[in-house]
Image (cartoon, rainbow, N blue to C red):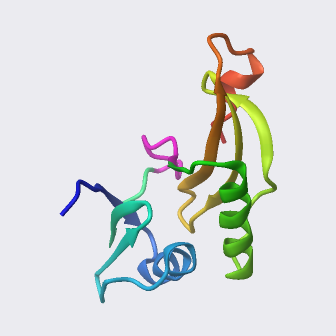
Amino acid sequence: MPSAVHISLNVSDLSRSADFYRRFFGEPTKLKADYAKFVTAEPLIHLALQPGRRAEDGEGALSHLGIRVDSSEEVRAWRKTLLDRGLPAEAEKREDCCYALQDKFWVSDPDGNRWEVYNVIEDNEATSREAQTCCAR
């Protein structure tokens, strides 16, 4: 089996979160009353969800999660698929972010965990002051 990324998220409402990730990644490989697991093939991700505590202010230490694809066409295809599945994906945009010019869009799960689907067009050694907050809420 190839290496894979495993992500485990505490969620406030397992049913709502499982529904979001079902539309984002497809059917779960495991779904229990207190646990859901999604395993994707492309990209290879193992995502586990379990009910858990949230920070008082609603924000944890996690900045965001991302899926890097190979082209702007793939960014557009991902967004179209998610919109077709009823997920409110933000508009695709080209921006200078994290020292790279990227095409991307964002979706947020029911707990506010933000996912970006993006591709890197070119790396930049310098970034503008505005670009330093491109991944911020």
> As rendered, which of 83 and 130 lies closer to the eye?
83
The part of the image, by quadrant, that contains residue 20 is bottom right
User: Residue 65, image x and y in percent?
Assistant: 49, 49
- The image quadrant that residue 93 belongs to is top right
Nearest the camera: 73 or 82? 73
Q: In this view, does 115 lie to the left or right of 75?
A: left
Q: In which quarter of the image is residue 9?
A: bottom left
How far across and how far down the image is residue 67, in percent?
52, 52
Q: Percent x, y for residue 119? A: 62, 43
Q: Looking at the image, is 5 positioned above or below residue 1? A: above
Q: What segment carries the magenta color?
A: 56-65
Judge by depth and name the residue closer to the eye, 54 or 94. Answer: 94
User: Would you say the magenta stretch is mainly helix, strand or loop?
Assistant: loop
Write the residue at 67% across / 72% down.
82
Is residue 123 placed above or below 134 in the rendered structure? above
Quadrant in the picture for the N terminus? bottom left
Compared to 133, does 37 lie above or below?
below
Q: Is residue 46 above or below residue 131?
A: below
Could you tell whether 91 is left or right of 106 in the image? right
